[in-house]
Structure formats: structure tokens, C-alpha cells
Image (spheres, helix red, strand yellow):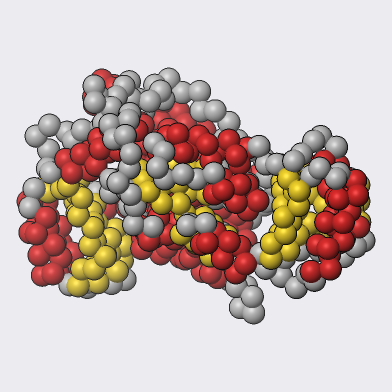
Amino acid sequence: MLDTLDAPSVRTWCRLSLAALGEAREEIDALNVYPVPDGDTGTNLYLTVESAAEEVDGLFGAGTPAPSLPQALRAMAHGALLGARGNSGVILAQLLRGIASAIGTDPADGPALCRALRRAADAGYEAVAKPVEGTVLTVAAAAASAAELLDPRAGLAAVAEAAYEAARVALARTPLQLEVLGRAGVVDAGGRGLVTVLGALADAVTGHTPMGPLALAGTRAAEPTPSGVHLAVEGGPAYEVIYLLDARDEALPALRTALAALGDSLVVVGGEGLWNVHVHVDDPGAAVEAGVEAGRPYRIRITHFAGAAAAEAASIAAAAGADAVAESRGVVSVVHGAGLAGLCTDSGATVLHADPDRPPSSTELAAAIRRARAREVVLLLNDTELRAVAGAAAEQLRAEGVRVAVIPTRSPVQGLAALAVHEPARRFDEDVVAMTSAAGATRYAELAVAEGESWTMAGVCQAGDVLGLIDGDVAVIGSEIGQTAAIVLDRMLAAGGEMVTLILGEGVPDSVADRLVAHVRRANPVVDTLVYRGDQPSSPLLIGVE
């Protein structure tokens, strides 16, 4: 349990928030009925926090001095401001900016966090042209008020947990405060996202997970419309306009006045010359022109609500089998290593080269899917940690009319097994089922080198030991790659198998594979063995058994 908040704990907060929003993304999307029921609040919040987390991670690069707490909080707020998506994402960016502006000490204690939560709530209300209760603003205010009711000397953990619990209670009351939520029988989607972020803060501070099931009345998903598509509010503006704006502070009052006259859901956040502008209008050109008069707008995103609904409807129609055979289908595979990239490219996949030290962002995954230039895309992750980020990327492409199926392959050997049965001539659903089945029928293992002493399921390992992981768990501790791999293969083949795939990592000699092929042939003469050079830097050897 932390007594004070520091820069590393802010980094942990970012990572926990991103993971939690990834898990809750679809649920929050389904809650989204206000201000426009376009079903994207969870995705927008995930993308906003992803940008914040990337900015904070950038402070911790090798060879750079350790950041201070104010630097980490400013980076978190700045990243959120640059990457803010949708109404809720923009408001969350302002809440984080409020926290950053209120904490100038390093580290910060409970009273400092209490003051920061109040500043965040006030900043949120100030940013919204016409604040509405029963929204994320109400939840933020309740969290701040609960913290203020504590003993003024309350510790950091007490403040964080009180804010989280009060936010949960306030979220449960939102259907009683906002009629559209009450009619739909749901809580506010943006408020649900903020509860998730505050829960991650409490988790980072206390070291335990307070974010169990919310168990709140009214958190069920909204009933879908007959078509299964969220529709724009009847009579509301037709477009959402978001852009970043370089402008002097004194230009903002006139900008707010001009945009308020054009539409609703106006939120302007930021400061020190950089702003994020969000508004719903019928005339998007006029909204952009107002930005031009105030300063320099860029990263302009204009979404036609009816157009987004039509794109989603097309995706749903395709999922129901409206088209027997796709006009265009692609496969995207996430890989580490030039050899693996070549294998996937030769099999017809579009490759995303992942950095071994940093997982790809949803933006990078979405860009790779676009590079496939296909209306239907199968995404092979080849990593256990990418499901949430892949879901956010798929949601972005779905709004563009691209149908994306994510096959959560846990290892490149499963990805190669899926690629081997890919058949574009099949119906999309049938192809996905076949590829998923092939991946699921492939057991996977890998070797890794221990970096230090640690407890594992196979016992205590020391730095330099070779670890054999089967299906993600350490099963063997050895001293040499070939010997350890042979033990791993024996254990995997004891359960049966027809084919073994070996993928050599960067710098591993071919002689290792030769020894293993001979070993398999002696012990299991009917089992075939395929050897590839993957050149992956993260593992000396990948093993698959089909």
C-alpha cells in the first residue's frame, strides 16, 4: 500500500486503467445512449487512456532521468488531450488536467489527492458549455465530495478508495437524474468509464483490486433497436466535430460562443495554447471555420452519425450472411522477427512488426488492418496480452465498414496453423471458424532465459536458467536450450501429436534444430517435424504441436 503518489505509481495507474477499460469496453459501448446513442463511449475512453499511457511510458525510457510526479501527471493529461475521442474522452482529458494542475509536490499524500479530485471535478464542469447532471460530471463531483468528507489527515489509500466507492454509488443514481438513461434502463456510459479509472487509481495505491463486478442497478446493456444498430437522437445534430486547436486563451470565449450557437454537446478542454474541441452540429464546416477564426485547428475528425450507423448496419448484415462470398478478404498477423514476418507474408498475410519491448497500440493495429485493403479481415494476435487493444482497433474499423474477426492466437505457432487453413473462397464465418479451430488444436510452448531469481510452477529459477513454458506456464527449468527443449517436447508429445513446428529465435544455431528433429524421430517416428527460422528476439525457440 502506498502512502504517497509518485511518478511510477502514475504509470501503474495508466496501465491498470487501460487494462480495465479494455475489459469493460464492450459493456460501456452498450450503455451509450447519451448524448448520442452511437455505441462508442467505451472505445473512445480506451483510446483516450491509451494515448495518455503512451505519453507517460515515454518518460521512462532507458537513459532518461526519472520523471517527477508533476511531470508524470502532466504527461498523462497531455496524452489524453491529444488522443481524446468523443464527448466522454474529451471530458476525461479535462479531469486529468485538473488533477495535474492541482498537484505540484512530489510525492503527493492523501490531502493533495483530495484537492486534486475537487479541482478535476470543477474543471470538468467548466469545460462543458451546458453541464447536465446524471453524467460523468456528476460522478466526478461525487468522488471529490466523498474525499472531502474524510478526516483532513486521511491517507492516500483512504482518499482513493472513498472516491471510488462514492463514484460507484453516484453512477447507480444516474438513471434517476437523466431521463434518457431511466427510459433505457442503463447508467451513464461516461460515468461508468470514470468509475473504472478511479478503481484503477485505488488499485494502484492499495495494491489490491477493488474493481470487482459493479453490481449496480441499471448497468445492463441498452436494448438494441430492431435493426441492432444504435441510432442518433431524433432531432439532434447530424455531425460530431472534434479537432485540436492551437489558440491563445483570449480567443476561447468567442470560440465557445460561436460553437454554442451552432449545436450542442460542446466541450472545450486544454490550456496553455493547446485545446481539444468537441461539438455536435448540423454544419461541420461552420464548426471548423470557427476554429480557424480562433487559431489553427488540426487533426480534424468529422463523424456523420447516420453514416456511422449505416456502416455498422452493413457490418451486421454481413455477419448475418448477407453476402455469400466476400469481394475482398485479408489476414493481418502481429509478429516479432524478420523470419516470422517472411513466413506470414509468404502465406498471404499483412504483417505488423511489433516492438518486443512495447506492445502495438490500437492505432497501429488499425493502420495494419487498413493496409490489408480488404472489406473482411482476420486478425491474428499471436500474443496473450493484445485482446483489449485488438478489440479497440476492430471497433475503429467497424465504423469504417470493415468487418474484423479477432482470433486470439497466443503464440506465432498458433498463428501459422491458422494461416495454413485460411481459404478466402469460403464464407467469412466458415473461414474464421476453421482458422480458430486450427489455432486451438495447436499446443504451444516457448523457451526463455531467466533474468533473475524467481519462483515458478516448476521451482526456483536463477538468472541465466533456460525456462521451458508450456501453454504459458513454466514447466521445465534447465541449463541448456537443446536439453530443455527436448524435455518440453517429450511432455507435449506424451499427450499425442502428429506434427511438431520449431521456430528458431535470433542467434540460435541450426544445430539446435537438428538435434531436436533427431530426438523427435527417435522417440516418435510417426511425428513430422517442420523447422523455420523466425529470428524473434524475445524467445530462443517457439514450439508447436498439432
Q: Residue at x 79, y 56 (%)?
A: 447
Viewer-nearest residue: 370 or 45: 370
Q: Which residue is drawn at 31% across and 62% down?
A: 270
Left/right of residue 38 with respect to residue 486 in the rendered view = left
Left/right of residue 440 with respect to residue 472 in the rendered view = left
Left/right of residue 297 with respect to residue 419 in the rendered view = left
- Residue 380 lies, in percent from the top left, at 52, 49
Q: Residue furthest front?
A: 526
Viewer-nearest residue: 178 or 355: 355
- Residue 5 lies, in percent from the top left, at 60, 56
- Residue 199 lies, in percent from the top left, at 54, 40
- Residue 172 lies, in percent from the top left, at 41, 26
**Rendering quarter of residue 200:** top right
Viewer-nearest residue: 380 or 147: 380
Above or below for 365 versus 376: below
In the rendered image, the quadrant that contains the C terminus is top right
Q: Can residue 25 be seen in this view?
A: no
Q: How many marks?
A: 0
Viewer-nearest residue: 308 or 41: 308
Q: Residue at x 20, y 50 (%)?
A: 303
Above or below for 219 versus 287: above
Q: Is residue 287 visible?
A: yes
Above or below for 325 versus 101: above
Left/right of residue 354 with respect to residue 175 in the rendered view = right
Q: Residue at x 11, y 55 (%)?
A: 284
